[in-house]
Image (cartoon, grey):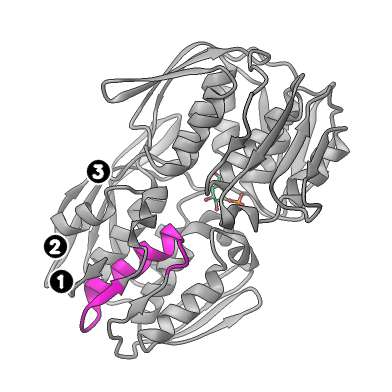
Amino acid sequence: MEIKKQQSLKGVLSVPGDKSISHRAVMFGALARGTTRVSHFLEGADCLSTISCFRKMGIDIEKDGEELLIHGRGLRGLNSPREILNAGNSGTTTRLISGILAGQKFISELDGDASLRSRPMKRIMDPLTAMGADIRSLMDNGCMPLRIAGRPLHAVHYNSPVASAQVKSCVLLAGMYADGVTSVTEPFLSRNHTEIMLNYFGAKVTSQGTTASILPEPELSAREVCVPGDISSAAFFIAAGLLTPNSEILLKNVGINPTRAGILKICRQMGADITLLNEKHQGEPTADILVRTSSLKGTVIEGADIPTLIDEIPVLAVMAAFADGTTVIRDAQELKVKESDRIAVMVENLKRMGADIEGTDDGMIIRGGKPLHGAVIDPHMDHRVAMSFAVAGTVCQGSMEITDGDCVKISYPGFYEDLYRLG
Ligand code: S3P
């Protein structure tokens, strides 16, 4: 994919549906009784992997015009799959579904692509094993492929060493099949879409500080889910609008759940001109986000803010490279185990553009404001890295070439078309 410097970016855009919420709508819809109707569902490759796994367990899922219909069969309505469940590139599919599979009456196997096979699964195997689950890494390396022999589970209180919504959700979902109240405490609050949506479907989930608890054997009933625009996708256009001269972009109906919206706080800290309009609350809070060209300055990104913007750090690193002054990102060691090692891959590619950046054990130090030029970028098949450098390409001198640019289809199949329309 080739991206050229833009004079200005202008227009109104409705970004695709939230990836985290789309996954959960399929999973909880499958475990509810009745037909769940989902609008603005994200048809990215990751969410299609979730659909394919549930279809293999006998759940009928169909398109009805623009909507997705999930014909749920109740908490114990899944069938034993005849084939391996393939989660593709999706960590969310793998870790959440494992919590569900651990409590079933059948054996299943889960696998994924090369990137997913290298990501840590011990973080879910540990709490599930503590609950009495039989979950094994078939290569005995704490990674996929996994074999899960479902059985009755015990309730636990799990102290998670990482602030991870995938780990938290895995334990809460397994808790639906346990013999008492299951709780998870995490070091910082991670995204809480599972807690919000499970309650909406009829489960009893409570949250206090960084602890979430669930009562077992909920009766989930089908619901209508309107998926808000994904702030993680909006982030690329927020950055592009701020960095490109003479720009004004209105992003319609974006989810601004505080456990996800850390990018807005950090952008403002960097001096960004961002206005929220038309704020609403329909289960999840949403707003239209108006972004105008701004001159940005460096900042520090750390601590409790990290889980609220973890997927936005690649594009924040690009913003920091164009900002005046130094940006320090710390407490973000989780970046090393995302779809790629996002510390190494961002450092490697920003250096190719002439940026002054160094990687650290838990983040990056970026001395911004150096003149940056186009380069050949290798995103290591990581969708968010590819989109971050597409944004860099709209601002830097010369043209930018992104190899394997179509990896954006994981979360944003129409990304380049949307960028092209605004330019
Ligand atoms: C997600 C949680 C985050 C995030 C991922 C989606 C989710 O992962 O990076 O893109 O939907 O729960 P971790 O839980 O590993 O932090």
Labels 3 and 1: the sequence-earlier one: 1
Labels 3 and 2: the sequence-earlier one: 3
Q: Where 307 sits versus 39, above or below?
A: below
- Give, as a single range, the part of the protein colored magenta: 379-401
Which amino acid type is shown beneath numbered disc 1?
Gln
The residue mark sitting in front, 3 or 2, is 2
Q: Nearer the viewer, residue 247 or 388?
A: 388
Q: Position of residue 309 (x, y in %)?
A: 50, 58
Q: CA separation, marks 2 and 1?
A: 6 Å
Q: Nearer the viewer, residue 32 or 78?
A: 78
Q: Residue 6: which disc?
A: 1
Which amino acid type is shown beneath numbered disc 3?
Ser
Q: Residue visible at 37% across and 75% down?
A: 377
Q: Are marks 2 and 1 in contact (CB under 8 Å)?
A: yes
Say whether residue 82 is visible: yes
Which residue position holds label 2? 423
